[in-house]
């Protein structure tokens, strides 16, 4: 149902973050992945991260998500997004605030599937060389969580995990 202003009836409602997300909402509205797909019921639809240092955060996520098979989706002055299948990740400009603390209420970490242990090893080597991220649990790597994985922090202090598949046993 159209509103009196003649706006798009399917557009997301504006909220307190309208100034930050309006361009994102408009840019994303035309994508096939912006509406739920019943075939993927229960799967993650999207994650939106806010960054005080947008440039370094976008550089990190552009690299990591590219390595994990995500494709660029949308780009606008206040952010960027990447998609893989029906799931997408968004980075937007946020206000400066306290650093992320894993034990505080809220998001603890984001975990992604790796294609192989070799991919985890390659990503780990790259993280060690990057200036915008930190390898976590170096003394217990790659089994810090009890299984083969990379743990690192993005430029904003968000913990990212990339989990390798189980080894095939004969």
Image (tube, rainbow, N blue to C red):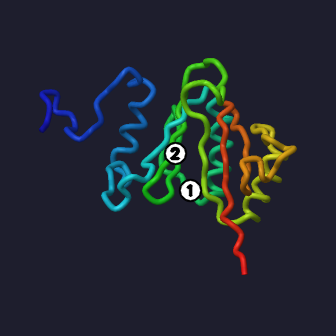
Judge from the rendering whether residue 7 lies leftward or rightward of residue 22; answer left or right. left
Q: Would you name the residue on which mark 1 appears? A: 70
Vertical placement of 104 versus 84: above or below?
A: above
User: For the residue carrying disc 2, how many other residues have a C-alpha within 10 Å: few (<14), some (14-19), or many (20+)?
Assistant: some
Q: Quadrant of residue 107?
A: top right
For this orientation, the residue located farthest to the bottom is: 170
Q: Residue furthest top?
A: 97
The residue at the point 73 percent across, 62 percent down is 119
Which of 117/21 is in front? 117
- Going 12% across and 28% down the picture, which residue do you hit? 4
Which disc, if any, is residue 58? none
Element carrying mark 1: loop
Residue where numbered disc 2 is placed: 89
In this view, the residue in front, 81 or 146, is: 146
Marks 2 and 1: CB-CB under 8 Å? yes
Residue depicted at 70% across the width and 34% down the height: 155
Q: Point out the image quarter for the C terminus.
A: bottom right
First of labels 2, 1 by sequence position: 1
């Amino acid at each position: 149902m159209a509103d009196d202003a003649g706006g798009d009836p399917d557009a997301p409602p504006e909220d307190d973050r309208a100034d930050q997300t309006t361009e994102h909402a408009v840019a994303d509205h035309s994508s096939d992945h912006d509406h739920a797909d019943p075939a993927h019921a229960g799967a993650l639809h999207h994650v939106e991260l806010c960054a005080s240092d947008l440039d370094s955060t976008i550089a990190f996520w552009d690299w990591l998500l590219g390595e994990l098979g995500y494709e660029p989706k949308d780009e606008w002055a206040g952010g960027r997004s990447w998609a893989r299948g029906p799931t997408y990740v968004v980075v937007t400009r946020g206000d400066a605030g306290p650093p992320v603390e894993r034990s505080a209420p809220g998001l603890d970490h984001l975990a992604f599937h790796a294609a192989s242990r070799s991919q985890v090893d390659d990503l780990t080597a790259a993280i060690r060389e990057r200036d915008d991220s930190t390898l976590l649990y170096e003394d217990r790597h790659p089994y810090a969580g009890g299984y083969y994985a990379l743990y690192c922090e993005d430029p904003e202090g968000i913990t990212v995990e990339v989990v390798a598949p189980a080894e095939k046993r004969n």
